[in-house]
Amino acid sequence: MNSKEEIRKSLITVLRLLTPSEVREKSIYIVEKILATPQYKMSKDVFSYVPDGKWEVDVTLLIHKAFADGKRVWVPRIDGENLVWHNIDEKKMSKLVKNIWEIPEPLPFWEPLVVQADSDAVCIVPGIAFDRFGNRIGRGKGFFDRFLKKSRCYAIGVCFTFQIVQRCPWKVWDVRMNKVITEDYEFTILNPGG
């Protein structure tokens, strides 16, 4: 089995070859699948990353649809080793500022999340690689793992089909997804905690 770093490096090389139109086209299919899930339909809150505009699944359409559907939308800001979640609206979405990694974030003085994400919330989780067991390889900082470990929300991992690997190396601190969605497939994990 390849190490997390080997898988990460290999897939980032391929991801960088995607054209903006390929990312956009594949992302539309993924967003449509998320919107069709019962978990999204029943959720009151949507926690989502904001794409870096390069090669991540572009969930911007999902965020705007969540606004239109009357859901509370939360996006993260990196604060030390943790994600601080801020409730945003359409106006604040247009005022996000890129951090040192070029990831759009809320401004620090915007209202942060003061309660844990509940079971009626969904969290859209990016990743470099996923497997069919819900395991994930992120960028290597553990931000989403730390958040998901403390919350009860339904975690949906999103990636492009070629990012599905046979097996992601897994450590005790890694958090499995409840579902993984690509432009071609959906995997529901029956026992993400086990």
Image (spheres, rainbow, N blue to C red):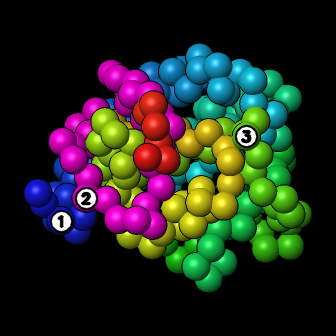
Residue with the mark numbered 3: 119
Q: Categorize mark 1 by other alpha carbons within 10 Å: few (<14), some (14-19), many (20+).
A: few
Please tell me which of labels 2 and 3 falls first in the chain: 3
Q: Which residue appears at 38% of the width and 70% of the height?
A: 140
Q: Which residues are magenta?
A: 161-188
Q: Residue 166's x, y, as percent? A: 18, 42
Inspect the image, locate mark 1, and give the three-letter code of the amino acid beneath it. Answer: Ser
Please tell me which of labels 1 and 3 falls first in the chain: 1
Residue 56 visible here: no
Helix or strand or loop: what does disc 2 sit on?
loop
Q: Nearer the viewer, residue 163 or 52?
A: 163
Residue 155 visible here: yes
Q: Residue 81's x, y, as percent? A: 58, 79
Q: CA distance from mark 1 to mark 3?
A: 32 Å
Residue with the mark numbered 1: 3
Helix or strand or loop: what does disc 1 sit on?
loop
